Amino acid sequence: MKEYAKLVGLAKSAVDNGFSRVGKSLDKGSPVDEALMLLSARAVAVGNAIVVLAQESLSNEALPLLRSLFELAAAMRWLVAEDREKRAREVLAEARASDWEMLWKTSRLKERLPLLELADGDARRALGLCVDFMCANTQGLPWGHVFEGNKETGVTSAELLRLAAIASGHVVKALDARWPGKFEGAEQLWEKAK
C-alpha cells in the first residue's frame, strides 16, 4: 500500500515541478492552458484526499473521489488528443455549469476512458465503483451481517491507491502531451502501479 501512495505523491511532484517549469509560458488567454491547470489542480487535491482516506482504512469512502480522478484524467487525455481549443472550451463550460449528475456522467467516461488504455479489469473497476461505495463494507454496524447484500468487502486500500496511481499517471501524461519534456514520468507511474 505504501508503494502505491508513494506513486500518487510522485505524480503530484511531477505536476508541481512541471508547472514550475512552464509557469512563465502559460498563456492567460489559452483555454487549453486554463483547462489543464484547472483539471490538474483538482486531480492533485483529489489524489491527496484518496491517500489520506486509504491510510485511515476508509477506502470505500474514497471511491467517489477515485471516480472523480478517473474523470479528470480521462478528460485531460481527451482534451490533448485532438482539437484542443474546442475541447478545452467544452471542458471549461462543463466545469462552470457543473452539477453532480453532469460531473459524473457515465456515458462521457465510457467515451473517454479508452484513451487511458486501462487493463479490462481496471476499466470495469473505474466504471463500477458506485456499487462498492453503496453496498460494500457495510457490516460495521451491529447486526449488519444479517443481510446478504451487506457481505461484500469492497475495495482494499492497496487497490484504491493502485488505481489512483494509474489515473494520476495519466494526468501527468496529458500535461506532457501539452508541454513535451516538462512533465516527466507518466509511464513509470502506471507501469509500477500495474
Image: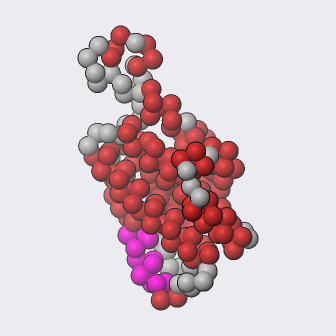
Q: Position of residue 171 (x, y in %)?
A: 52, 63
- Residue 56 in view in this figure: yes
In the rendered image, the residue lying farthest to the top is 146
Looking at the rendering, the stretch of residues picked out in magenta corresponds to 13-23
Q: Is residue 151 above or below residue 94?
A: above
Mark count: 0
Q: Position of residue 37 (x, y in %)?
A: 50, 72
- Residue 77 in view in this figure: no
Q: Is residue 156 above or below residue 36?
A: above
Q: Classify residue 54 as left or right of residue 152.
A: left
Magenta span main SS: helix
Q: Nearer the viewer, residue 126 or 1?
A: 126
Q: Classify residue 170 as left or right of residue 7.
A: right
Residue drawn at x 63%, y 43% is: 106
Q: Is residue 96 above or below residue 54?
A: below
Q: Could you say which quadrant of the image residue 41 lies in?
A: bottom left
